């Protein structure tokens, strides 16, 4: 316990606090049990340690569930020792790496009423399907990749407040006119698309994309086998599947042909697509009129963010694909997106969106209510034509 406390103090003390992900300010720490799920590399560990620093007035212990301590101890026994020593806040990192994590956390919650637990895990994990039901106990948060707004703060010190979707749609001209007095968004936007999604770019684009490839391999080689018991033979097929998708996005899947090409049973293939979506490697969308089941075939597939498009593809990404991928990645954390009969995207069962370059016309959505054109390569918009980059300020 003393070793863990000392290690925890050092980690919490050394965590940088100059930049905080947007979720840092949104987490309600009045709950006794808090979960933070997200993609590998999104910054969950840093966020957890920053929360530890924020709670420094209490006795806090941070520990990762892959620590060697857990070869002979359980999370419950750790919580018991920590509670007896006067512990108040237990920070558990990467709980999916411990096989009976949900039962352990449930017992901790039930038996130590004055001990707060905040835990992180891979987004692959479904916390509501563990062996113990935590749904009525946990306050759940999801940490997406960095938005364009966060990238500007992290890399360039340009600090702007988030903007709601309604404000973007209704007041975009006034908003962009004011923002252009502070910075030039199109100067930074291409760099964000290449290397702005994860908070570990250090100036070397090739090194960044290699780190991103390593992260993807960790998801496939470690997270999926641990959480979903996927065997090695299928992992190799999943890697091939991801490569096929990455070189063909946006992809309208023919499941039968894809299944034959990858040599993977149809149901296993659809499950793999669902897991890739949970792992935040893909976005899968459905038509707005469809009823969705677990084994429903997606209607269209994109990579989860534009950085993956550069890292996984064997050529420069198509510009139209980058536009759509960016738009989905910025909207998806807080809004519902489906595929309409006309236009590109249907948002919150309310707004129709058509995306293109600065010369894009609105012929496809002409006469449709609540319809907007989102255009790339322009600083400011007019009427119902809105610059694409502005949607990077939603969070």
Image: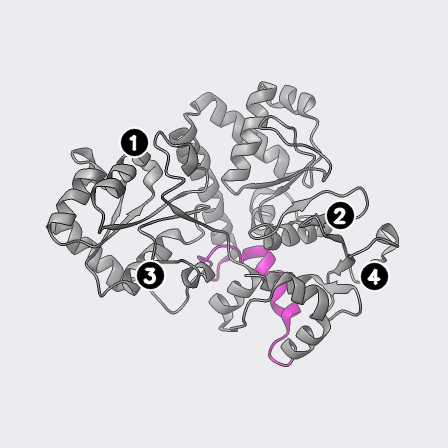
Kindly check if marks 2 and 4 are in contact, taking CB atoms under 8 A apart as contact: no
Kindly check if marks 4 and 1 are in contact, taking CB atoms under 8 A apart as contact: no
Mark pair 2, 1: CA separation: 43 Å
Tag shown at residue 359: 4
Q: Position of residue 120 (x, y in %)?
A: 36, 47
Ranked by sequence position, the earlier of labels 4 and 3 is: 3
- For disc 2, the marked residue is 344
- Image side of residue 355 versus residue 57, left or right: right
- For disc 3, the marked residue is 50
Mark pair 4, 1: CA separation: 55 Å
Q: To which quarter of the image does residue 52 belong? A: bottom left
Q: How many marks?
A: 4
- Image side of residue 368 versus residue 246, left or right: right
Judging from the image, what secondary structure is the residue with disc 2 in?
Answer: loop
Mark pair 2, 4: CA separation: 16 Å
Q: Position of residue 286 (x, y in %)?
A: 68, 37
């Amino acid at each position: 316990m003393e070793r863990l406390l000392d290690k925890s103090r050092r980690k919490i003390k050394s965590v940088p606090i100059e930049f905080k992900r947007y979720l840092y300010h949104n987490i309600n720490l009045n709950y006794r049990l808090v979960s933070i799920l997200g993609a590998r590399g999104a910054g969950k560990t840093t966020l957890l340690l920053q929360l530890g620093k924020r709670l420094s007035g209490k006795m806090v212990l941070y520990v990762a569930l892959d620590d060697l301590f857990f070869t002979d101890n359980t999370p419950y026994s750790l919580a018991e020792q920590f509670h007896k020593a006067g512990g108040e806040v237990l920070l558990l990192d990467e709980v999916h790496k411990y096989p009976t994590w949900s039962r352990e956390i449930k017992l901790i919650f039930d038996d130590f009423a004055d001990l707060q637990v905040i835990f992180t895990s891979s987004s692959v994990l479904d916390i509501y399907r563990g062996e113990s039901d935590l749904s009525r106990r946990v306050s759940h948060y999801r940490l997406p990749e960095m938005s364009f707004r966060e990238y500007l703060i992290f890399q360039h010190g340009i600090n702007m407040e988030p903007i709601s979707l309604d404000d973007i749609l209704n007041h975009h001209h006034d908003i962009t006119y004011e923002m252009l007095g502070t910075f030039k968004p199109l100067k930074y936007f291409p760099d964000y698309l290449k290397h702005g999604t994860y908070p570990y770019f250090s100036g070397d684009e090739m090194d960044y994309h290699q780190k991103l490839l390593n992260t993807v391999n960790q998801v496939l080689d470690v997270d999926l086998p641990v959480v979903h018991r996927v065997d090695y033979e299928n992992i190799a097929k999943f890697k091939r599947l991801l490569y096929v998708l990455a070189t063909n996005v946006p992809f309208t899947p023919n499941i039968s042909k894809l299944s034959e090409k990858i040599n993977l049973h149809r149901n296993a293939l659809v499950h793999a697509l669902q897991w890739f979506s949970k792992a935040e490697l893909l976005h899968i969308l459905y038509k707005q009129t469809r009823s969705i089941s677990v084994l429903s075939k997606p209607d269209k597939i994109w990579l989860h963010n534009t950085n993956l498009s550069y890292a996984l593809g064997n050529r420069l990404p198509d510009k139209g694909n980058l536009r759509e991928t960016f738009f989905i990645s910025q909207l998806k954390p807080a809004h519902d997106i489906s595929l309409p009969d006309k236009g590109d995207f249907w948002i919150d069962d309310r707004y129709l969106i058509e995306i293109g370059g600065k010369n894009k016309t609105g012929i496809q959505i002409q006469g449709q209510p609540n319809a907007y054109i989102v255009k790339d390569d322009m600083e400011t918009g007019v009427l119902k034509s809105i610059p694409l980059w502005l949607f990077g300020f939603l969070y």
